[in-house]
Image (cartoon, rainbow, N blue to C red):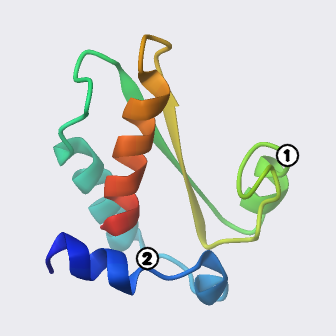
Amino acid sequence: MKPIEAIEKRQSIREFRKLKLTEKQINEIRDYYTSIKALVPDIETELVISTGDDAKIRLEGSAGYRGHAFGAPAYLTILSEKKENYVLNAGFIAENLILK
């Protein structure tokens, strides 16, 4: 799929609430993350994937939309070393993951 098609087909989290990710899908996300060429390659990042019924409770206040966790099937959190342009770099990686 071309990037523009992926952008046009992007769906809201609310449309996925009832679905659960398989271990195969989680591994595919992890593998894809390691293949992303970061915007600033010398900034260390780490992907944390939170799943399960308690993920919403654990992440409430720090994930989701303005700290409101929606109860998604999985939350992808990008941890980053704090350097110049680290937020831009993490956002670039996140958008790549979202489009995947």
- In depth, the one of 90 and 7 nearer the eye is 7
Residue 46 in view here? no
- The residue under the point 33% across, 67% down is 99
- Determine whether the residue tagged by mark 2 lies in a helix, strand or loop: loop
- The residue under the point 35% across, 83% down is 8
Report if the CB atoms under discs 2 and 1 are less than 8 Å apart: no
Among numbered discs 2 and 1, the one appearing first in the sequence = 2
Using a 10 Å C-alpha cutoff, classify the residue at mark 2 as few (fewer than 14 neighbours), some (14 to 19) or many (20 or more): few
- Determine whether the residue tagged by mark 1 lies in a helix, strand or loop: loop
Label 2 vs label 1, nearer the camera: 1
Q: Which mark is residue 88?
A: none
Q: Quadrant of the C terminus?
A: bottom left
Q: Is residue 69 left or right of residue 97?
A: right
Quadrant of residue 22 within the rendered picture:
bottom left
Quadrant of residue 23 within the rendered picture:
bottom left
- In depth, the one of 52 and 32 nearer the eye is 32
Tell me how many marks there are.
Answer: 2
Location of residue 56 with respect to 80 vertically, above or below: below
Query: How far across and down, in percent of the image, does residue 4 sit?
Result: 23, 75
Amino acid type at mark 2:
Thr
Location of residue 94 with respect to 90 vertically, above or below: below
- To which residue does mark 1 refer? 61
Q: Quadrant of the N terminus?
A: bottom left
Query: How far across and down, in percent of the image, does residue 63 sit?
Result: 72, 49
- The residue under the point 85% across, 46% down is 61
- To which residue does mark 2 refer? 22
Residue at the extreme top: 83
Residue 37 in view here? yes
Amino acid type at mark 1:
Gly
- In depth, the one of 93 and 26 nearer the eye is 93
Query: How far across and down, in percent of the image, does residue 35 sit?
Result: 17, 46
